[in-house]
Image (spheres, grey):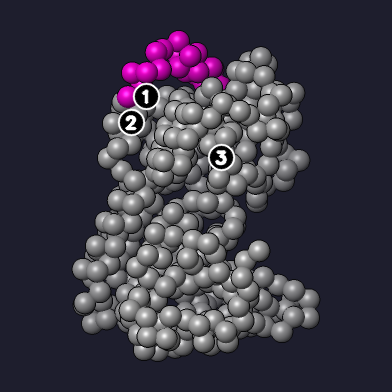
Amino acid sequence: MHERLTTQSYALRSPIKAGSEKPLLVCFSHLRWDFVWQRPQHLLSRAAKHYNVLIIEEPMFRAGVTPHMDVSERPQGVTIAVPMLPEGLSHQDVISEQHDLIEELIGREATSPRVFWYYTPMAMAFTSDLECDLCIYDNMDELSLFRGASQELLDLENALFARCDLVFTGGMSLYEAKKSRHRSVHGFPSSIDFNHFSQARSIHQDPEDQAKIPHLRLGFFGVVDERMDIDLLAEVADLRPDWNFVMIGPVVKIDPASLPQRSNIHWLGGKSYNELPHYLAGWDVGFMNFALNEATKFISPTKTPEFLAAGVPVVSTAITDVVRPYGEKGLVEIARNAKEVVTKVETILARPKDSWLARVDRHLAAGSWDKTWGAMHKLMLDSMGDAATDRPASSLPVYATTPAE
């Protein structure tokens, strides 16, 4: 159980208000902390060593509820705040309520050192008048290309670029796309918690729901959404009915009924971060069947180095940030259609694994989430002194937004 705190009790217990030397870092996120362990969790759990980390998630709606913040703590040393709002509010009222709840929680003025860390530009609609000493946009995906993206998001991202002091990007292709939009853009591709995933190399017991699936096993883990090429999965499964495909992850934004159903495709649902090495340990090949579409144009899949750290060879579609550097270095096999997937898997099975794994380990040794956070933090500290004076004023008035259609 997570420890529950009221808005008032959080304010009273906040180390910032109690005179702690740690600055407050407030993250505005479109991703739930308890959903899938990925980039925000890796970075902000490390940030908690240097900052009091408060993560404000998107609101949840309940019938008849009085607007309030549901505040709780996590073992990683971060605090999660979720605006709880009544159903039926207008778009403008949702924005206003979030603004008021956040202002009540942290205050409009930055009376102590305060960092704002944005994952979603949409939060600019209700935070543009709140003060901070340093503003960061960790641009982990090209959200404007995701299904359902609005003109409002594009407008608010422009406002966020105008306000922020630093822009981090989740991959190098995204860095190339954004580097001309801000004076201080820095590419930080997906990194690796090597110790966690390398456990898979020495695990020999299958989880119960995987134990009865025969080898050869090809595995995928991650969010199952419009970025997955489900037709490619079906084609490969039909070409090789003797191969089994283990698919792990929650299904979002697409109809679960649209997922291909075959006797050799096994949809196991979402698993926790701690469980993943136990599943990967039983896979012969990793299968990153990403669609090549607008939503994947700039992605840098975190799972690429995670597969490699687990010692699982990978076949991937031609995602730019996988081709460079993993494909070019021969660490990941790149396939452009179902027949190539089959050929690349057969290539992997025929080659000696030890020499490949040695090259993998040399590559992975150059990076880690600790190193990524350390480089980010240095940029933050370097920027902190002049952030307040150099930052252009936001072009947004309080609550400014495009009305819902």
- Which of the two residues, 356 or 31, is positioned nearer the viewer here? 356
Q: Could you say which disc has been placed on residue 361 in the image?
A: 2
Q: Residue at x 59, y 75 (%)?
A: 71
Asked if residue 305 lies left or right of residue 92, the reply is left
The residue range painted magenta reads 337-358
Q: Residue at x 59, y 58 (%)?
A: 34
- Which of the two residues, 48 or 260, is positioned nearer the viewer here? 48
Q: Residues within 10 Å of mark 1 (few under 14, many from 20)?
A: some
Q: Residue at x 27, y 40 (%)?
A: 366
Instruction: Name the residue at the top extreme.
Output: 350
Q: Residues within 10 Å of mark 2 (few under 14, many from 20)?
A: some
Whether residues under marks 2 and 1 lie with C-beta atoms below 8 angstroms apart, the answer is yes
Mark nearer the N terminus (1 vs 3): 3
The verdict on residue 339 being magenta is yes
Residue at mark 3: 276
Image quadrant assignment for residue 157: bottom left
Asked if residue 158 lies left or right of residue 359, the reply is right
Q: Where residue 361 sits in the image (x, y, percent)?
A: 33, 31
User: On screen, 310 above or below 123?
Assistant: above
Please state which amino acid type lies under the numbered disc 2. Answer: Asp
Q: Where residue 40 sits in the image (x, y, percent)?
A: 46, 58
Please state which amino acid type lies under the numbered disc 1. Answer: Leu
Residue at mark 1: 357
Q: Main secondary structure of the magenta part?
A: helix
Q: Could you say which disc has been placed on residue 210 in the image?
A: none
Secondary structure under the numbered disc 3 in the rendered image: helix
Q: Where residue 259 sits in the image (x, y, percent)?
A: 70, 37
Asked if residue 328 lies left or right of residue 336, the reply is left
